[in-house]
Image (cartoon, helix red, strand yellow):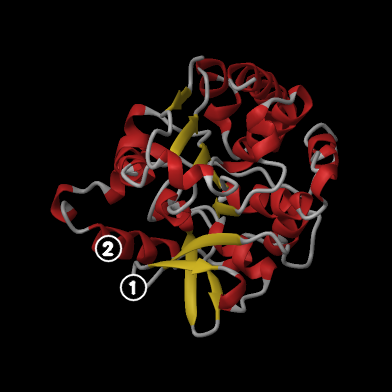
Amino acid sequence: MAGVTRDDDTAAPDRRAARTPTTALVLSGGGVAGIAWEVGVLHGLRAAGGTLAAALDAPALVVGTSAGSAVGTMVAAAADRGADWDLEDAWAAQHEPSTTEIARSVDLEALFARMADPALSGDPVRARQVVGEFARGIDPAEAPGRGHVCTGRRAVTDRPRTPLRITAVDARSGEARIFDAAAGVDLDDAVTASCAVPGVWPVVPIGDREYMDGGMASLGHVPLAAGHDRIVVLAPMITPTVGGLRGLEEELAEVRTTGADVVLVGPDEEFLAGPGAHALDPAVRPEAADLGDRFGRALAAAHP
């Protein structure tokens, strides 16, 4: 099936047979359209059933970056309910005409090109510092209601019991930061920081630091899921340019060396040419969710 790759797990079969295999879910960025698509994929997967859906009934870990941080909180909260893992509320929300989302525009290719400046080649931290300088130039007054937007996406207020790692980037140092339960950071702040796209949303102050979109360091931060037997990665914005720049291939190769069964779920051309091309426009949510649902059902068929 287009957009899906899988590695069969053949490493250490005797060791793995002695215990219940664990599954980690990695949700990467993709704007408002990406949120709807990821929700749709998971909804369709769950509705169709199969081994992959069953494995995600109780993920051992959820990793969320940017849009994936919003969906990740939904998934982790739903997984807390065990057999009631269905995301029906999140699915329905993608089709409601009223929304807390605010339409914005961003040239993602131009943003990534800024980070790919030849003068910064080989120094990704410095590249992120340059983007951070740009991000800190956005006046919070230009984005009223930003916190309300992120709160409205999640429909949960308390940190889920299911392990959840949310990523962001320190806008000054360029270093990635992981907001998990041990970090002691408010869930609203963590998700808002992870979704703070430079040039679109202002940086988010947490303590004495300022944070921007976690996608500036990695499309999905897949290595955070290392150590699990199966790693399912949903990446709605994989393209030859963006996917290569963010180092997704290298991250997947890294976790494959651990013997993990890796399932990479990327978009089809219909999504990329349609709602994916208008990633921050709330009007594309229903179409993105429907395309994701169809994709999720096909994914389930590939993992009966």
Q: Position of residue 267 (x, y in %)?
A: 52, 25
How many numbered markers are drawn?
Answer: 2
Does 135 appear above or below 113? below
Identity of the residue drawn at 36% across and 66% down? 133
Identity of the residue drawn at 57% across and 49% down? 19
Q: From the viewer's perspective, is 254 left or right of 187?
A: left
Residue 284 falls in image quadrant:
top right
Q: From the viewer's perspective, is 236 left or right of 149?
A: left
Residue annotated with mark 1 = 173
Q: Which label is found at residue 211? A: none
* Residue 32 makes an appearance in the image: yes
Q: Which label is found at residue 125? A: 2
What is the three-letter code of the residue carrying label 1? Ser
Q: From the viewer's perspective, is 115 left or right of 101?
A: left
Q: Position of residue 150 (x, y in %)?
A: 70, 57
* Residue 142 makes an appearance in the image: no
Does 138 appear above or below 28? below
Q: Secondary structure at mark 2?
A: helix
Q: Position of residue 235 (x, y in %)?
A: 50, 36
User: N-terminal of the two: label 2 or label 1?
Assistant: 2
What is the three-letter code of the residue carrying label 2? Val
How busy is the neighbourhood of tag 1: few (under 14 within 10 Å), some, or many (20 plus)? some
How busy is the neighbourhood of tag 2: few (under 14 within 10 Å), some, or many (20 plus)? some
Residue 14 falls in image quadrant:
top left
Assign the C terminus to one quadrant of the image: top right
Q: Nearer the viewer, residue 212 or 37?
A: 37
Disc 2 and disc 1 in contact, CB within 8 angstroms: yes
Q: Position of residue 237 (x, y in %)?
A: 48, 34
- As measured in the structure, the alpha-carbon distance from the residue carrying label 2 to the one carrying label 1 is 8 Å
Q: Nearer the viewer, residue 111 or 92?
A: 92
Identity of the residue drawn at 85% across and 44% down? 84
Q: From the viewer's perspective, is 217 left or right of 41?
A: left
